[in-house]
Amino acid sequence: MGNDAGDDAAGPSGAAATDGQWLWTPAAERVERSQLTAFARSVNASSNGYGELHEWSVRQPARFWEAAWRYLVPSVPLDGPAVDSDGSITDARWFPEVRLNVAERILAGDSTPDGAPADLASELLVAVDERSRRRTVTRAAATEQVARIAAGLRAAGVGPGDRVAAWLPNTIETVLVMLGAASIGAVFTSCSPDFGAAGVIDRLGQVGPTVLFAVDGYTYAGRPIDRADDLGEIVGGLPSLEQVVVLSHLDGDPDVTGLRSRVGVPVMGWEEWLEPHRDASPSYVQLPFDHPWYVLYSSGTTGVPKCIVHRTGGVLLQHLKEHRLQLDVRAGDAVCYFTTCGWMMWNWLVSAPASGATAVLYEGNPFHPGPERLWELAAAERLAFLGVSAKYLDALSRSGYEPGHEVDLAPLRTLASTGSPLSPEIAA
């Protein structure tokens, strides 16, 4: 998924690679200081490089994942065996004795080599939208807000295994709702506000959410798009709902009066909903490794989107492996993936603070007002990692804009692309 973007690149320049050619290889010094090298040494698999480590992980999966857990999640004790299995992969239960809470781990940011919590004054999230509105939340402030959200959910009757849904933009409150749900063991699921009512009902209707967090609208390419009518249709199409909380992404407070009069479910504004829980204290339910964390959906290109349940420990461990070992994300890094809350990369991005990094959220059109938008964001936020799609890179190439010549990208170590294969021309 990733292509590093450092000055130590070696390989063909200015032309597509042919079979047998490397597009890029890291300098020896960079390999030496990488977290992957440190991990390989910790399991005595460094003498023959990456190939030896990979072969060991395939041949000895229980030993590999046990070592990965101890290295990547040092703050959570590894009690019992790494796997309980009779030899069948379908019946295997990984880390059956482990108990953890992913919201606690993400907020603490203690998935680092020494397991030390991140500075509570450091930024957990930075949110920027296409109107250049920038907001931040520290780990301390986010912890307080998550406690209030968790208290609000409990007051609404939500408990472990109940579903909490979001129809929200890629911004701070969306992440905090996910963490609030996870802190009490509720199962989170989300759709982007650019999904129409039918698409949202197709997805959320299958999981039966108790509480829906929704937005009044969003902007795209500078144009405000009101979603009040769609919200009413969505609420009407989800009979499982017991409460709706509306946030504003447009100017001003959302007017929920009209929605209240049209639906038979209690509807509240965000601040109104949080107000009774101002003094809530952080609390995290310790859950089994296999407890559900969130539900994602297939694309829906072959019928109604299919629900895909992702589980607490497995997702956290896999994301930490990708972030720290495969992409070398470090404590203090700023990490951004251009995504919406309807794509799996959003879920991937918002795990990054578990490693002590800051997740940078961008909401809007990546070409508004021009192709420079994401690259100016990368420079302003001093991103160490930026993720995009192959389609985006192709459009950027056709625009003629050359980021490396226009903005300072010195802090950017890694550029990643996913979603579809890169063309040889773009990859080169």
Image (cartoon, grey):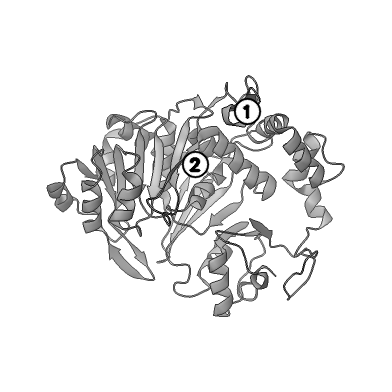
Q: Mark 2 points at which residue?
A: 139
Residue 65 makes an appearance in the image? yes
Residue pictured at 69% horizontal, 36% vertical: 113
Left or right: residue 99 compared with residue 40: left
Between 61 and 291, which is closer to the camera in this rendering?
Answer: 61
| Quadrant containing the C terminus in the rendered view | bottom right
Depth order, front residue of 170/98: 98
In terms of image quadrants, where is residue 62? top right
Check disc 2 and give the amino acid type.
Arg
Q: What element carries label 2?
A: helix
Residue 138 drawn at (x, y percent): 48, 45
282 w.r.t. 428: above or below: above
Quadrant containing the N terminus in the rendered view: bottom right
Locate residue 181, reporting x and y percent: 40, 36
Judge depth for marks 1 and 2 and give the one in front.
Answer: 1
Image location (x, y in percent) of residue 413? 68, 58
SS at mark 1 in the image: loop
Badge 1: how crowded within 10 Å, few (<14), some, or many (20+)?
Answer: few
User: Which residue occupies the foreground of this view, 219 or 17?
Assistant: 17
Tell me which residue sits at (27%, 32%) in the image.
156
Q: Residue at x 51, y 74 (%)?
A: 371
Judge from the rendering whether residue 174 lies leftward or rightward of residue 387; answer left or right.
left
User: Callout 2: 10 Å neighbours few (<14), some, many (20+)?
Assistant: many
The residue to which callout 1 is attached is 88
**Would you place residue 400 above or below residue 192 in this image?**
below
Q: Mark 1 is on which residue type?
A: Ser
